[in-house]
Structures are given as structure tokens and as C-alpha cells.
Amino acid sequence: MTDIKKIKSLLEIEKKRLLEELDQLNADGRPSEERREGSPFGKREEEATESLELEKRLAMEQRIKEQLTANDDAVRKIDSGTYGTCESCGKHIEPARLEILPTARRCMNCKALQAKNAKSR
Ligand SMILES: [Zn+2]
């Protein structure tokens, strides 16, 4: 039996953590005002580093937003009473799995199948 209350509080904590992470990311994301002068390559190198950093940050932001969406979906499912059902086979997702990963959309079997298919692609 899945402890929905526990799951929901886990999701709330996780959401708070994700939002903080997003804030942190945006705070770190301010463009640096200090630029290295001198070496003719220094600036270009730094710009390359900055765009790489920006790319990394965007990827991280994307990942956090996806997690937030998954989190919201899970909360919505709890509210509508469909939480804990595998999206692929419709069976109940193992409660132990949900406790570790409250935003899980698929049961262990389907997840394993999906991973296998992704690998063979
Ligand atoms: Zn399944």
C-alpha cells in the first residue's frame, strides 16, 4: 500500500528544493563583469568558456524544469486519484519504487524495457 501522504510531502519538499536550485542557477548566471585583458586569446577563450557555461546552465535549467513538471504531474495524479499507476502497462507501480522516485511514471518492468529499447536504438 502506497503511503500517499508521505509521497505528497516528499514531492512538496522536492519541489521546494528544485525551485531553490533554479533560483541558485539564475543567481549564478549573472554575466561576469571581470574580463581578462592582455593575451589576445584570453578574451576569446573566456567567451568560449562563458558560452559553454551558458549551455551547461541552460541544460541544467531544462532538467530542473522537467523535474518540476514531473513533480506537478505527480501531485495532480495524487489529487485525481490516478497516482501510482504505470503509464505503459497500467499496473500499480511498486510502492518501494515510488518512495525512492515519487515522480516515477512507469513500473520497474516497463522502465527496464524502456532502458533496453533505448540502448538498442
Ligand atoms: Zn508498467
Image (cartoon, helix red, strand yellow):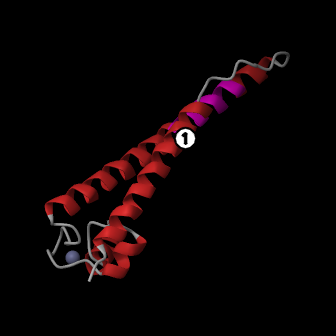
Question: Residue 115, how many percent across, how many down?
Answer: 34, 71
Whether 60 is drawn above or below 45: the answer is: below
Q: Amino acid at mark 1?
A: Lys
Occupied quadrant, residue 52: top right
User: Which residue shows up at 16% across the image and 79% down it?
Assistant: 91
User: Which residue shows up at 49% across the image and 51% down it?
Assistant: 17
Left or right of 64: which side holds 73?
left
Left or right of 85: which side holds 9?
right
On-image quarter of the N terminus = bottom left
Is residue 85 found inside the magenta-colored segment of the image?
A: no
Give 62 or 97, whichever is nearer the viewer. Answer: 97
User: Which residue shows up at 28% across the image and 76% down it?
Assistant: 113
Q: What is the magenta range?
A: 46-57
Instruction: Report the residue marked by disc 1.
Output: 56
Give 35 or 61, whichever is nearer the viewer. Answer: 61
Question: Residue 58, how many percent across, how many down?
Answer: 48, 37
Total numbered labels placed on residues in the image: 1
Question: Residue 19, how many percent across, how many down?
Answer: 46, 44
Task: Say what secondary structure mark 1 lies in.
Answer: helix
Q: Specify the principal SS of the magenta part.
A: helix
Left or right of 68: which side holds 79?
left
